[in-house]
Amino acid sequence: MKNLLIIFLFTVSISANEQIPAPPQKNPILLKNGLIHTVSNGIVEGSILFDKGKILRIAKYITPPENCEVIDLDGKHVYPGMIAAVSGLGLVEINAVAVTNDHSERGDFNPNVRTNVAFNPDSEIIPTTRSNGILIANVIPASGLVSGQSSVMMLDGWTWENATLSFPSGLHINWPNMNSSSRTDNDKKRLKAARQQLDHLEKIIKDARAYARLRQTKSRLAEDYHNEDLRWESMIPYVEKKLPIFVHANEVRQIEASISWANRHNLEIIIVGGKDAWRTTDLLVKNRIPIIYEGVTALPYRRYEDYDQAYKTPSILYEEGVQFCISDYGYAGRAEQIRNLPYQASMAASYGLPKKAAFRAVTLSVAEILGIDEKVGSLDEGKDATLFISDGDPLEIRTNIIQAYIQGKKIDMGDRHKSLYSKYKEKYRQLDILKE
């Protein structure tokens, strides 16, 4: 019991930040004399007004309403909050400490798993992520063949309930490795396991459709409803094509097989990962399959590929007309890396992707793929006032995010990185090493 108490106290100490979630917006806020980067309609040199969490107006000059807080930007920039398309944020604190991880469940078939109920709004990783302009994250499950359902979370809130922006955003499937090599015994075992998983996927869809038809049968006795299976209930919106399935696949054979599978079963899918997406652009465009491209800064996928293949793939997708967005790696073990999302987009811009398209790839393009573009992703009248003020281009590493708002709420911009910076800055002052 004593050891359990020690573990609990340790977990609390490492997983809670000291910041207080912001209260709802109480009065109108006018940001004036700035550059408003709408993403959807270019740049407006002027002002933006928002109240009760919604953007009311964007124009060169806006007369402030009664009881309005007016902030002079003095030429600074306003951008929509960036969106992490896939992330383990809020589910992982320290990857090596098992008690701080809540991203996986036992077994291969867990469609009823919901990430939002496990989301920890007190994670220390959240403030450091917000400080780089990422204000929304699609939080995903991570284990098994069918992992569960992801949730779009706002990066501020007292509880998971008031941090949830949209649930569910989709079902996640980890497509089996389709490497056809069978030179060794291990290769043969992997190939056999992949075939079994593919057969399992076929059976899952057929059984889910059968269950959905059964649920619609009028002759079903009322008492049968007490025997509902939460796993199959969770599958109904996906086999009825009401919600998308996120298929995690990188290799070209995985992508082609998953598209064939989706067409055969009349399913809506989104490819996550997509390292080989540049090889299948015609197929992606023909079938209107979006790509959440992970890891722009990754190494080449194969020895014979160009050294910069990962960097330039977004520009290829853009030129070929593939619907795509950019994400850092979404698996749970790298939740802390999602703060580098703007630099993934920046690298893509350095290798051929137009700068406007690069920023769109981490804002409005993400929102469109996740189906939340009516709320967030750009600065438009009627959308959520989820935005940030910066002193420059957020894709540049030297740019500072000065202030962020989520649904009009003014966010505490402190984080552990900043507090440690201040601490050790003072240390070197005391040692007379730092003279400022």
Image: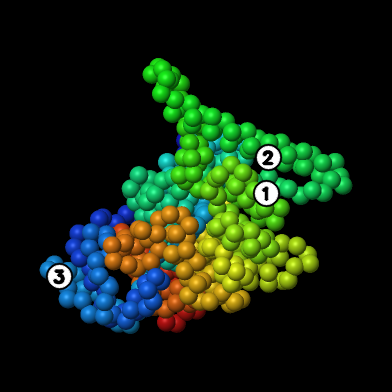
Residue ID for mark 3: 65
Residue shown at the point (17%, 69%) measured from the top left: 68
Residue ID for mark 2: 198
CA separation, marks 1 and 2? 10 Å
Q: How is the image coloured?
A: rainbow
Label 3 element class: loop
**Proximity of marks 2 and 3: CB atoms separated by less than 8 Å:** no
Disc ID at residue 394? none
Residue ID for mark 1: 257
Residue shown at the point (50%, 63%) measured from the top left: 339
Q: Residues within 10 Å of mark 3 (few under 14, many from 20)?
A: few
Residue shown at the point (47%, 46%) measured from the top left: 243
Q: Do we see residue 194 in this rendering?
A: yes
Residue shown at the point (25%, 70%) measured from the top left: 57
Q: Residue 378 or 130: which is nearer the viewer?
A: 378
Hey, what amino acid is under mark 3?
Answer: Pro
User: Image check: 145 left or right of 408?
Assistant: right
Q: Do we see residue 4 in this rendering?
A: no
CA separation, marks 2 and 3? 60 Å
Provide residue 303's location: percent of width, then percent of height: 78, 65
Between discs 1 and 2, the one toward the N terminus: 2
Q: Residue 59 or 236: which is nearer the viewer?
A: 236
Hey, what amino acid is under mark 1?
Answer: Ala
Name the mark nearer the viewer: 2 or 3: 2
Name the mark nearer the viewer: 1 or 3: 1
**Proximity of marks 1 and 2: CB atoms separated by less than 8 Å:** yes
User: Image check: 159 left or right of 233?
Assistant: left
**Proximity of marks 1 and 3: CB atoms separated by less than 8 Å:** no
User: Image check: 306 left or right of 138?
Assistant: right
Hey, what amino acid is under mark 2?
Answer: Leu
